[in-house]
Amino acid sequence: RRCNLSCGYCNEYDKVSEPVPVDDLKRRIDALHRLGAANITLLGGEPLMHPDIAEIVVYAGQKSNVSLVTNGFLLRNSVIEALNQAGLNNLTVSVDTLSADRTRYIQKSFQSLKTRLERLRRLARFDVHITAVLCDGTKNEFKDLMKEIESLGLRMTVNLIHDDRGEV
């Protein structure tokens, strides 16, 4: 659940949780394997904050494909190489807007992540795609965001932000 960001629309993180112990995660992964899970997705919070993320990917990958959803800010060369070595199948980077949001409600802008996305294109041996949240605050730049992501040769999916009643 721990995350290095605090986006205003997100309720899936905190700043105090300790990483789930690897043995606990392995037991949970074993249960998913027994159920025949074709794919196990690691998300958070920010899963790259877990100190044993590569070990977890290796373990989950013994009987399933493994995906990871990240905000992208921790994607250093060494992290990408560790995920390559671990056998990660695909990685989704959440990019919500083209340019920085001065209110910090949305923190994952293309401008702040561009060099990391370029790094992924060069180094990753796993599938990479982008997901974006379309909302009032991002709709005016959305076509330009799509063009920028396309220019990097990456695929994109779109999530629509909703209110507490589930309405878009």
Image (cartoon, grey):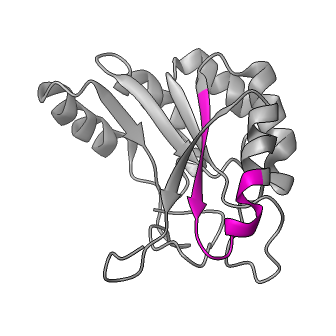
Q: With respect to residue 166, does 73 lie above or below?
A: above
Q: x, y (%) of residue 22? A: 39, 41
Q: With respect to residue 20, does 87 lie above or below?
A: above
Question: What residue is shown at x 52% (from left), y 63% (from top)?
Answer: 2
Question: What residue is shown at x 80% (from left), y 52% (from top)?
Answer: 144
Residue 77 seen in render: no
Looking at the rendered structure, the number of numbered marks drawn on it comes to: 0
Residue 72 shown left or right of residue 86 in the figure? right
The foreground one among 35 and 19 is 35
Dividing the picture into quarters, in which one does residue 101 lie? bottom right
Question: What residue is shown at x 45% (from left), y 74% (from top)?
Answer: 11
Dividing the picture into quarters, in which one does residue 91 lie? top right
Q: x, y (%) of residue 159? A: 49, 56
Residue 17 shown left or right of residue 40 in the figure? right
Q: x, y (%) of residue 148? A: 81, 43
Residue 73 shown left or right of residue 165 in the figure? right
Residue 11 seen in render: yes
Residue range highlighted in magenta: 128-143
Q: x, y (%) of residue 135? A: 58, 70
The foreground one among 37 and 96 is 96
Q: With respect to residue 35, does 19 lie above or below?
A: below
Question: What residue is shown at x 49% (from left), y 22% (from top)?
Answer: 89
